[in-house]
Structure formats: structure tokens, C-alpha cells
Image (spheres, grey):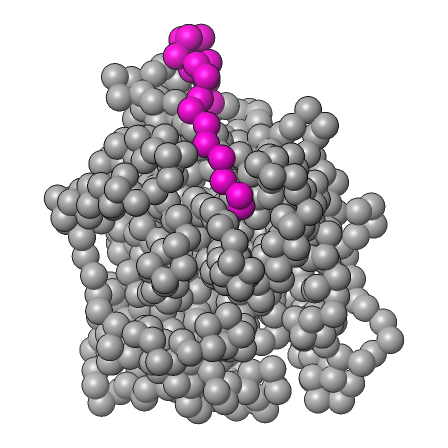
Amino acid sequence: GQAFVCFSPSSLLSLLAFRLFSSLLSCSPKMLSLARVATRLPHVGSAFSARTLSRPAALSAPRQFSSDPRLSEERVSDQTDVLIVGAGPAGLAAAIRLKQLAAEKDQELRVTVLEKAAEVGAHIVSGCVLEPRALDELLPKWREMDSPITTKAGSDKMLFLTEGSSVPLPVPPSLHNDGNYIISLGNTIRWMGAVAEEQFGVEVFPGYAGSEVLYHDDGSVKGVATNDVGIAKNGEPKDNFERGMELHAPITLFGEGVRGSLSKQVMQRMKLRSAGQEEQTYGLGIKEVWRVSPEKHKKGSIVHTVGWPLDMETYGGSFLYHFDENLVTLGFVVALDYKNPYLSPYREFQRWKHHPAIRETLEGGECLSYGARAISEGGLQSIPQLSFSGGALIGDSAGFLNVPKIKGTHCAMKSGMMAAEATFEALQQREPESMAALTPHSYQRNFDSSWLREELHAVRNVRPGFKWGLFPGLINAGLESFVFRGKTPWTLSHGHKDNESLVPKEKATKIDYPAPDGKISFDLLTNVSRSNTWHEEDQPCHLTLKDASVPVEHNLAKYDGPEGRYCPAGVYEYVPVEGDESKMRLQINQSNCVHCKTCDIKDPTQNINWVTPEGGGGPAYVNM
């Protein structure tokens, strides 16, 4: 089975010290500069012991930085052959594939992976039913390895829910799970990270948040810089201040996941989404892991639902998977193009658990973990240009996810592998020791001729059909899945941006959500504590506002303050202004942030800009 692992601050510090010492003994001279900066990492240890949430002072203005000369000191820099931002399924698959290709050619290739979480896998949250197709290609003998992928998928069930009953639906072909596995993706990524390091020599550095894309004079990507640490809320350097460092590479692969802050910068600067191309559309996935009574556990069982409690205009659904020893992973996904500003995805999830078809599994059990993450739902229509001078987008940073299949891990892995092959091909053309930017041109061609594109093309019209409502969407999905099988000569458009979908409060119906009972459903802050989220309190707010007046003057006035309802972590709340309770202000509790990126997506005027906090901050998910 998969163990629930908890690190105390002292044990984590010992681990970090050991990793640092090992790096110093085995790495190249270039690596010494990065290892030296690693001495700042002890602050991440608290992430694994934080069990309570705080309410910091309001931080609802753009970040302010001082003119202290230390902030403009030259950063330490290092060079690597390939830089990968994000140690997720795409990033690690790319890293492993690059080292495999180098070994086949008997070449030395330095591959460096940066990960903002304190530990590889700590920020990963997913369903997750794994289709092993890409993993079979990457590591053909993985079944003989000591992996956490052990629970084979069993029975499949699809239910349409009304408030008090359920109706079985035909299981569409995309949700047949023969040969698949129910996994903790976080644990699987921890395992892949170890394989990448120990078997292939990939240099993986958790606790480093890439905060800035670096460019050559000609506009091509040069690499990334990690953020400075030891800056106070007021922008002044503290006693422990240390500049970030720069990492340069001919090719940088951006695999940060959905709505990655650096990927967003690159897409805008490089104009990777051409005029007239579909915008990405998103969903918010919220998940819990429970330990249930042994007599209720059906190992391998898979249940998906649609319908209640969502209204007929809102796209979404749920999953409930039995895996490991008496563990159940369950979650709820709400499309972020929903219209009602009073809708709370979190509270919809909580009341869904009280449905008789779901509650019976949970009664007598214990909720162990909680997490949330935005997901890409745009499909093939929304995938941007993949490569550019100096890099490429991989995984969810590019939008690789099969929505009807409710699977993205195999898509992310395959995209990383294809990008790695294109990157290795491009590197063969460079001059010795040159750090000039290269373009992995064949990445797009690799994708266009791959089974991944064929798979995404076949389901491209399912998600857009739900813009007409639940029942028209289900009819369209049935026709696409059972009759046309993706061979229709047209491609449907999503037709909107998620942040533009809310209707004014006067046209919306308030939703009366039931109070949590503390057994099946929980208040938000109780659940967020189960995510083990921690951030350094005294640092600039990473949830930045372009205009501090917009929340009250626009969002509160027009939509009755939707931030506090769409955020699944209690980050945003409107409170009275001290000294004048007739006025309101937006309070941002940044310490609660689980890095889901929902606010960056759903904010009506795109006034919220999510940037990276100090490396090591955020959730420390267990078994997610």
C-alpha cells in the first residue's frame, strides 16, 4: 500500500542537508553555485507541520519594493543544457526522455528541473485514474519497479443525480478503464522524481520558484530567474535576504501546470495564441481523500456523476474512486464559465457528498486530505503554438487534457516526451558550448502525427457542447461518443472567456447552502488545514492587484464579491473598513492559498495576477 508520510521540521532539515551534501560531492563545478543557494532552504520545513490557518493583515494593493541597493545586486547565474520548470508528469517525463536519448548517443547532457514545492509531488492534486500508455513508452519496465501504481481499475459506473435519487447512464467509451490504474498522482510524481534523479542523473531542485523569464537581446528565451527570498511585506529586505539566481539554457521547457505564471508571460510576449484562436477554458477541481470502513471499500471501483447539485446551465461533475487499503478519493469539478456569482464550487462539493449515493460510502469514515486545482478544459481547439525561440510549453501549461476521458496525466507525459525528442534534436545542431537560444521545431510536428492529437481530435466537440446547457450537452456528447465518434466535419467553439461569464447580481439567484455537519461536510478552513498549506507570513503578497480599487468598485458593486465564493481556500473576503464600517475592503489571506490559480482565471476584469511566492511555500499534499 501507499504510506501516509509526515515530515517534522527537524527531519526535513536533515533530509535537505543530506541532499545538499550529496550534491556538493557529485555535481559539476557549475552546480556549486546552485548548491550554495540551497542553504537558504531551511525555511520550507514548516510546510509539513502547519495545521492551523492565520488571518494576516489585509494585503490588497500592488506589491511595493524599496530602493534598497541589495535588490538590484547582480544575481548568481548558472548554465544547463536543458532547463525544465515544474516537476510534474510532463516535466519529469521530459527530463527522463532527454537523459535516455543522451545515453543512446553516448552524450553528456545536463538536465535541470526546478520545482516550487518544498518536495517533489507536494503541489500535485488530481483524480486520478492513470492510463499507462505514455508511461509504458517512457519506462517499459515500470511494472517491475517499486512504484506506487498498484490499484487496477475495476468496475465503471456513471450516474445522473437528482436531489434524492440517481439514474444509471451508459458509460461512454472514453470512460472505460480496462487496463488503467487508480493512483495518488502526488505519490506517483514523488516516485518519478526519484527515478529521474537516481536512475537517470536528472538534477531536480524542489523549493525553487521560477519567478521571471529571462530573455536575450533578440527576444528569445534565455532561461529563468528564481525569486528573491527574505523580503518583508513592505518590500524591504530582511536580515535573511538573498537574491534569487539565474539559470540559463539553450532551451527551457515550461511545465508549471495550469495557468503557470511564467507560461502566461511567455504566451503573451511570444504571441503563442494566434488571432482568432480559441481561448483556454478551465474548470476547478476540488478533492478529498477519505479512509472508509473496510466493509464499504470496493477496491478498484470507479463512479462518475453529473447533475445535482449543479443547475442545468453549469457544466461539472464528480468522481469517487476506491484505491489502496480502505482509501477513497472523491472530487467535484465545476467549469469556471459558470454564470451565477453566488455559486460556490466548494460548497457545491460539500452538499454533493450528502447525496444518498455518495453519503453511504463516507459515513463512519474519516477525511484525511483536501486540495484544489484548476484544470484545462479547452481541448484541442485551445492548445497554443507549442514551441518558440528558446523553449516550449508542455503538459497543462499548454492545455493537454482529455476532458471527456477525465484524464490528463498520460497527455502531459506524452507532451513532455515529444518536446524532449524535439529538444534533443535541436541540441544536435548547436555549436559546442554555445548557450544561444534554440527552437525545438519538430515538437509541433511530433504532436500533429501522434496518438495524442488523434485522441484529442476525437473528443474536441464534447466540452463545447455544454455551452448550450446540461441536457443539450449530454445529447451532443452522446452523439459524438457513440455515433460520430469524433468524425464530424466541424469543430465547435467554446465562444467565451471564463472571466466574462458572470451575470450581474441583480440577475442572479442567491444560493442557500446548508451548514456543514462536521462529519460528511466541513467548513472551508477546517478542510484547508488538511492541505498542510504554509507560506512565510512576512513576505509581499503573491496575489497581486493591478488596481486596488477594482474589487470594491467593480466586483463587489456588480457581482456582490464573487472572490470569496470561487476561491476554495478562504483567501478572499470582504470586511468593513476599520473606523468606517459603512465601507468595505477586500482582505487577502495569502497564507491560505493552495496555488489553484482560480482567482487568476475567474476574476472578472483580470485584475488579480498570481505570481510565485517564496519557494517551498504552498500546500504539502499527502496522497493527493
User: Does residue 556 appear to the left or right of 360 in the view shown?
Assistant: right
Residue displayed at 76% across by 54% down: 278
Would you identify the image quadrant in which residue 188 lies? Answer: bottom left
Residue 305: x and y, percent?
Answer: 50, 79
Q: Is residue 25 left or right of residue 509?
A: left
- Depth check: give the residue in front, 351 or 182: 182
Of the pair 575 and 481, the residue shown nearer to us? 481
Q: Is residue 374 left or right of residue 152?
A: right
Examine the structure image and report whether residue 490 is included in the region drawn in magenta.
Answer: no
Segment colored magenta: 63-82
The residue drawn where x is 37% and y is 45% is: 205
**Quadrant including the N terminus:** bottom left
Q: Position of residue 439 (x, y in %)?
A: 69, 45
- Residue 232: where, in percent of width, then height? 33, 21
- Is residue 498 among what the camera can see? no
Image height of 420 relative to 324, above or below: above
The residue shown at (67%, 60%) is 378
